[in-house]
Amino acid sequence: MSELHRHLGLAGYAARNLARLWRRSLAVGVPLALAIAVATAATLVADGIRQDAALAASYAPDLTVQRMAYGRLSPIAVGPFGAVLAARPEVAAVRPRVFTLVPAPGDESTGALATVLGVDWAAAGEAPYGVVEGRLPAPGETGVVVLGRGVAASLRPGATWRARGPGGVVALEVVGLLSDAVAIHGANLALTSLEDARALAGLAPDEASELAVTLAPGAREGSLADHLQTQFEGVRVVGKGALGRILDAIYGSRSGAFVTVWLILLLVSPAAAWALGMSVAASERHEMGVLKALGWSTLELVEARMIEGGLLGLAATLAGALAGTLYALGGAPGIAGLFEGWAALYPTFRAPLAVDPRSALALFAAGIVPLLAAMAVPAWRIGSTPPETVMRD
Amino acid sequence: MPAETLSFSSVSKRYRGRAGEVVVLGKLSFALAPGEALLLVGPPGSGKSTVLALAGALLRPTSGAVRYGERALSSLPEHALARFRGAEVGFLFQGFRLLRGWTALENVALALVPKGLPARERAARATASLEALGVGARASFRVNDLSGGEQQRVALARALVSEPSLVLADEPTSNVDRPTAELVLAELRRRKDCGATVLVASHDPALVRAAGLCDRMAYFEGEGRVRVE
């Protein structure tokens, strides 16, 4: 027990010292808290976007077959490709999909875009989209659209949206609003029939933007993708797994680069702690001499200093994490756009916040460990103050 | 803790400076039994404080041996010396040596941290020590806001809070008013009467003698020469 109370006594001294020398504490703690706040907000937003992107990728078909020409997506002929695909034993179903970017409803001067996705509502596999208001289109129904809530702006079921795409203007009746279960869908998607999407995209009746392939049970996406890419020139096949990995890599590296650059700023705090610790005032050295005369050992003085660093790092990291969370809850203005990429073009995209336990652990480690490391040498230096210092004026 | 015999055996202390070697203390020998008090008398800079620092294990001698009972202080490792100071020694420094910015209570309680006492007990003991010296009402005051006499009482409370068996006082009556000086000397005498060994350095021995505190005298004659009677 007495050992525990001794350590608690040292911690009490350290805490009191932090409060007493508040200017020094602020000089180290404030930059640390600020850096942690931004890094926390960035991590929350980035992890949220990655999680949302992963969820969006889970809606993707097993395989997406596209045609490339001169490095760009080119319309794919549904008949010939569809027939080849349908003949393969690995394939359970093939569905054409048409997509195009159009100005979102509302003020076009904002440049906000919506992705119109034309799907075959009669086919299985297009059901996962849920609505919070209204309904999904019936199989074969044309002239109607289901909008993401963010895309819809002021439009509600029953309203008419005059969508303007590369192929012309198409009047669509809004019949439902998509749920925000996947934020990027709610902010970006407009679901309509294949026919209406083709009219907007300017595609011929037998053309599609891509083919969505559902694999037969037990079939491997790799072997079919290899077969298609060797059989057809200019075909790109994207597997569901690969899509998830691509999205994770895009948003992961984007946030990773930002957080890494930002965390470099964290070095300001350890550097300040080092500088303040190494430039010991005579009064402070004197104080160490007094404590040694009272029976404090070098190790106890070092421990007290390290506890000071730990408490300061913990307090600054907690304060920074709290401020960063509030900032993220407020939409993280100024940094959210860095992680959203294309999503920044969407009308009201608001990434859900999420935190990966590993990210949280890394943030706390980044806040505390460098500070403790920077304080070790100065702590030892001041802890080694000779006890006779107390006798000197 | 019961006091033990403090002994100096041919203890010398020399410093090497730019102007060459300075002998502060040359081959000092004496022994002080528990309950004895030694008054160190001499002009400033004659080595009185050095003897106190050697006795309190703040310094190691250049040669010779300082012993406290069976313990050879000259050869103990640093952490053992720290434990010795915390357990056995009570220092009353010239100029108080209180921690600025800390309260009187905190200054006294800090001496009890290495003992591993619970915070409540540290505070209770420190409060009792301050009250015994008439500054209990100043416990929550920062020492910067106390008068010189009050600071000396707080410093004495800190020196005695762990009931040391060896009390070392460096110029305890300088820079304080007469009532405070008399109170300090009376308290030191009380400790001596309880069996503690007491060393008092003073360049104004009349007051100390008048208090009947010291049994023996050590005269510091300069250049390291000391005569103990």
Image: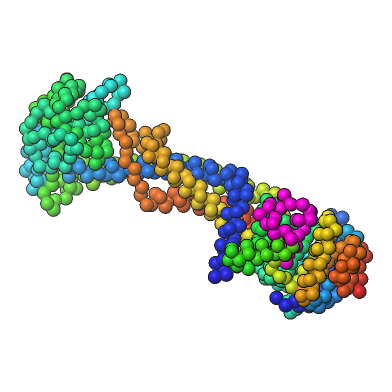
As displayed, is residue A151 above or below residue A371? above
Q: Residue furthest bottom?
A: B70
As displayed, is residue B43 above or below residue A333? below
The answer to which of B212 and A89 lies nearer the viewer is B212
Residue B1 shows up from this direction = yes
As displayed, is residue B220 above or below residue A255? below
Q: How many marks?
A: 0
Residue B222 lies in magenta, yes or no?
no
Going 15% across and 27% down the picture, which residue do you hit?
A: A158
Q: Residue furthest right?
A: B221
Task: Estimate the x, y position of residue B168 in percent, counting from the top left.
Answer: 79, 67
The answer to which of A293 and B101 lies nearer the viewer is B101
Task: Estimate the x, y position of residue A324 in percent, counting from the top left.
Answer: 43, 42
Task: Estimate the x, y position of residue B111 in percent, counting from the top left.
Answer: 67, 63
The quadrant of the rendering that contains the N terminus of chain A is: bottom right
Residue A362 is left or right of residue A341, and the answer is right
When asked about the image quadrant of residue A74, the answer is top left
As displayed, is residue A100 above or below residue A260? above
Q: Which residues fall within the magenta stretch?
A: B134-160
The quadrant of the rendering that contains the C terminus of chain A is: bottom right
The answer to which of A103 and A65 lies nearer the viewer is A103
Going 41% across and 41% down the picture, which residue do you hit?
A: A326
| Colour treatment of the image | rainbow
When asked about the image quadrant of residue A168, the answer is top left
Helix, strand or loop: magenta stretch: helix
Residue A117 shows up from this direction = no
Residue A376 is left or right of residue A104, and the answer is right
The answer to which of B40 and A262 lies nearer the viewer is B40
Task: Estimate the x, y position of residue A237 in percent, counting from the top left.
Answer: 19, 40
Going 67% across and 48% down the picture, which residue do you hit?
A: A279
Going 83% across and 59% down the picture, which residue do you hit?
A: B179
